Amino acid sequence: MIELPYPDTIDDVEKLEELLTRPTPAAVDALSRVDGDVLVLGVAGKMGPTVARMAKRASDGAGVRRRVIGVSRFSSAEGRRRLESQGVETIQGDLLDPAFVDGLPGAPNVVFMAGMKFGATGNEPLTWAMNVWVPSLVCQKFRRSRIVAYSTGNVYGLVSSGSGGSVETDVPNPAGEYAISCLGRERMFHYFSQTLGTAAVLVRLNYAIEMRYGVLVDLARKVHEGQAIDLGMGYVNVIWQGDAAAMSLAALVDAASPALVLNVAGPEILRVRTVCERFGELLGKPVRFVGVESADALLSNGQEACRRYGPPRVSVDLLMRWIAHWVRRGGPSLGKPTHFEVRDGKF
């Protein structure tokens, strides 16, 4: 596979999605080493299309013919059509329905991306059903599969900005029902990995970025629009969504019983004030701040994933320049703020 250079700017969605779905050598190698089809559950979320398309491209790059199948309710017919036009088969249905889950085709490789975050406060029963009960259905159906299941760095809780970020062996300390239910999701995968021998990797992601969504996009848009930046959550680490997707696919070869826990996060801890001042320079805008920086934040240490699969290809500096260009030109947004500044776990 020939590594192509990254451009200085991204001008449209087509180019963005081509860049997002470029597989890494580690992802291509993993898809060459695992047998059988790949099933992506919850494929219509913010990151699911990237993972599914990359799985197809990595398989093609490895010279392996396989089906990549995306499963979702597909509230957007256009989103489903785009996936199918890019070689990803689709199945429409509700993962809350046990009969639907039981009727899904068997696949040796499963990427679990379903879950609920925003709207969790005030809708706790559905949050727990999506984040805990659905994983139990999936584990029983796909007990003989390799499963890479997405989780979140929120399960760790707040840590000192000088700590280097939470590591995989840290004791979880989730705050709020969303994070607690995500720990419940992990417990289901751990339980079935132990009792059924299911090989699994739990990917604790923190935070994926592309031009239409992510912490850096939120901050850039606020700077561009002259909004004050709340410094309460004063530190963050981020990773290009294409790199996060590639790491999760590469992790298929490391699925194990008991389940492996793996942070996927950018290697740098960023100061929000410094990030916004840089966006002010790139956008030619003054920057206003409110609040006081706290000494702790939601931070993950992603060094182990980098050791296994290689460091991120896209630097924070390039990400910021891409985002500033995108925002300045009025590029489209998914319209879904990350709410990364929330400190009490209520999403």
Image (cartoon, helix red, strand yellow):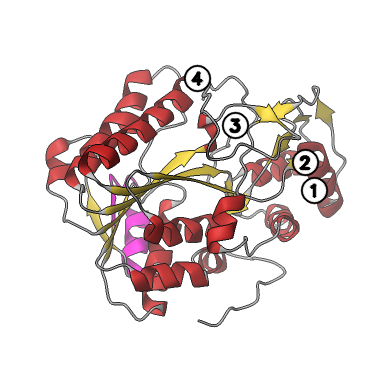
Q: Residue at x 38, y 19 (%)?
A: 124
In this figure, which residue is indicated by the disc labeled 4? 176
Judge whether residue 281 is colored magenta. no
Q: CA distance from mark 4 to mark 1?
A: 31 Å
Mark 2 / mark 3, whichever is N-terminal:
2
Residue lying at the far top in this picture: please name it: 122
Please report contact status of discs 1 and 2: CB closer than 8 Å, yes or no. yes
Judge whether residue 76 is colored magenta. yes
Q: Residues within 10 Å of mark 4 (few under 14, many from 20)?
A: some
In this figure, which residue is indicated by the disc labeled 2? 223
How many labels, in total? 4
Left or right of residue 211, residue 101 in this image: left
Picture layout, residue 300 above or below residue 304: above
Q: CA distance from mark 2 to mark 3?
A: 16 Å
Q: Is disc 1 placed on a helix, strand or loop?
A: helix
| Marker disc for residue 60 | none
Amino acid type of the residue tagged 2 in the rendering: Val
Where are the magenta residues, as a range? Answer: 70-85
Mark 4 / mark 1, whichever is N-terminal:
4
Q: Nearer the viewer, mark 1 or mark 2?
A: 1
Mark 4 / mark 3, whichever is N-terminal:
4
Mark 2 / mark 4, whichever is N-terminal:
4
| Marker disc for residue 279 | 1
Mark 1 / mark 3, whichever is N-terminal:
1
